[in-house]
Image: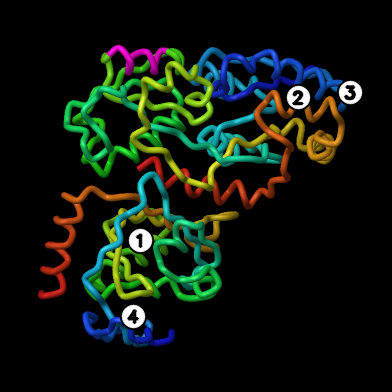
């Protein structure tokens, strides 16, 4: 029997091959067959989860909420480093210098990442901007979000910090950051479905020691981390409680 | 809970006596100085079922004006500002003890007698069907909403 592995689609496109290499490493380390399925977007991924086609997942904090509370998934590790943060950007020539300068009718370019979009919406609240007085334009990729902003087709764009830093220096020079989130407490996590709970100790052992080999270090670096950290179930429950306050 | 010592510049501070629902009283000194909410941040804390702070993030520490060690183990009402009507906190406790989320605009008292406004959401931490504590997450409110809340709270305190 092969287990199905997926990754929340918020990672940069250039890391696709790295996740396939990670999956190969995972299979060899555990001697179990694992099939990596990278979904085109959050909707496709949610459909796969609902259909019971996901056994292990590197999930964003919002998906982790659903998976842990409703689907019985268990959190075992998270990549170290900076938590999941996002930026709201505008074009350099845009008159707004801060969030408070944005008027009703503001056009927002964003991808369909519920995590980034929820935090972005919260950061617009101080300007009294909500779904009822803004125009949201969803785009397929964060490159397209940046393009919309640069072409003046959107006033602001929502980007994960990683995606913003991944833009070329030329593009970043044409953008200005109106605000960067500093949430500090929400992270992607690695989750196992019920069929793999019995192997949780094996997964934890190989993930937490991954940085001890040169190959493991290279792979972690390619995925934007330096090591995996252990996660207690209560850590994730706490994060889920926080997430639940953000979706009001 | 210990009384608040008079701030060094106590000339501009006004003394108040707070009466808590549990019968405790506390003397505080209040100034008119508002600390702006830090852009992009969330203030997060966690309490046990009695409202004793067990965990908080750095934003909570920074905005409160206390050291982390002065906060952990203290009742959350350490941050209670005398301009907040007690009925708001009664509603908060009744709501979360019933297992539901509470949210509202709150004026918090800093250690230095100043204040900061937040939009707060409090959720019960439910584990195995039992409430084991509460998590509170605060975010930056719009000034318009703060003005509305301030006017309402003044009215509630008068009535």
Sequence-wise, the earlier of marks 3 and 2 is 3
Which image quarter is the N terminus of chain A in?
top right
What chain letter is assigned to the residue under label 4? B
Q: Are marks 4 and 1 in contact (CB under 8 Å)?
A: no
- In the rendered view, tell whether residue A170 sits above or below residue B60: above
List x then y, in percent, for residue A186: 54, 43
What is the C-alpha distance between the residues marked 3 and 2? 19 Å
Left/right of residue A12 with respect to residue B145 in the rendered view: right
Mark number for residue A31? 3
Sequence-wise, the earlier of marks 4 and 1 is 4
Mark 4 or 1: the one toward you: 4
List x then y, in percent, for residue A63: 54, 32
Mark number for residue B95? 1
| Prevailing secondary structure of the magenta residues | helix
- In the rendered view, tell whether residue A43 sits above or below residue A199: above
Which image quarter is the C terminus of chain A in?
top left
Q: Secondary structure at mark 4?
A: loop
Q: Are marks 1 and 3 in contact (CB under 8 Å)?
A: no
Q: Give the residue drawn at x 57%, y 15%.
A: A13
What is the C-alpha distance between the residues marked 1 and 2? 48 Å
Q: Are marks 1 and 2 in contact (CB under 8 Å)?
A: no
What chain letter is assigned to the residue under label 3? A
Marks 2 and 4: same chain? Answer: no
Instruction: Identify the magenta region.
Output: A144-151
What is the C-alpha distance between the residues marked 2 and 4? 56 Å
Mark 2 or 4: the one toward you: 2
Q: Secondary structure at mark 3?
A: loop
Q: Give the residue drawn at x 70%, y 33%.
A: A192
């Amino acid at each position: 029997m092969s287990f199905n592995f997926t990754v929340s689609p918020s990672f940069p496109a250039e890391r696709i091959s790295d996740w396939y290499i990670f999956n190969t490493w995972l299979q060899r380390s555990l001697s179990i067959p694992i099939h990596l399925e990278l979904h085109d977007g959050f909707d496709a991924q949610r459909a796969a989860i609902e259909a019971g086609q996901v056994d292990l997942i590197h999930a964003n904090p919002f998906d982790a909420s659903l998976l842990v509370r409703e689907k019985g998934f268990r959190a075992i590790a998270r990549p170290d480093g900076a938590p999941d943060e996002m930026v709201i950007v505008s074009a350099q020539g845009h008159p707004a210098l801060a969030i408070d300068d944005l008027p009703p009718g503001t056009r927002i370019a964003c991808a369909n990442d519920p995590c980034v979009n929820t935090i972005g919406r919260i950061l617009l609240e101080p300007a009294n901007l909500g779904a009822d007085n803004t125009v949201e334009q969803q785009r397929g990729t964060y490159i397209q979000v940046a393009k919309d902003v640069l072409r003046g087709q959107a006033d602001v764009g929502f980007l994960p910090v990683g995606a913003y830093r991944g833009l070329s220096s030329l593009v970043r020079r044409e953008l200005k950051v109106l605000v960067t989130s500093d949430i500090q407490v929400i992270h992607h996590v690695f989750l196992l479905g019920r069929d793999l709970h019995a192997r949780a100790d094996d997964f934890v052992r190989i993930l937490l020691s991954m940085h001890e080999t040169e190959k493991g270090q290279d792979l972690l670096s390619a995925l934007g981390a330096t090591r995996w950290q252990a996660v207690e179930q209560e850590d994730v429950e706490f994060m889920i409680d926080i997430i639940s306050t953000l979706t009001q | 809970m210990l009384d608040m010592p008079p701030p060094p510049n106590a000339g501009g501070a006004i003394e108040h006596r707070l009466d808590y629902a549990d019968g405790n009283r506390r003397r505080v000194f209040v100034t008119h100085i508002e600390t702006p909410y830090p852009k992009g941040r969330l203030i997060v804390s966690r309490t046990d079922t009695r409202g004793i702070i067990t965990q908080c993030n750095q934003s909570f520490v920074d905005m409160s004006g206390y050291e982390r060690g002065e906060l952990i183990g203290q009742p959350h009402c350490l941050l209670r500002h005398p301009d907040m009507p007690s009925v708001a906190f009664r509603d908060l406790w009744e709501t979360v003890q019933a297992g539901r989320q509470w949210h509202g605009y709150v004026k918090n008292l800093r250690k230095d007698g100043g204040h900061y406004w937040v939009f707060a959401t409090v959720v019960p931490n439910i584990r195995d069907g039992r409430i084991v504590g509460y998590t509170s997450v605060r975010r930056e409110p719009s000034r318009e909403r703060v003005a509305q809340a301030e006017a309402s709270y003044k009215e509630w305190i008068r009535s």
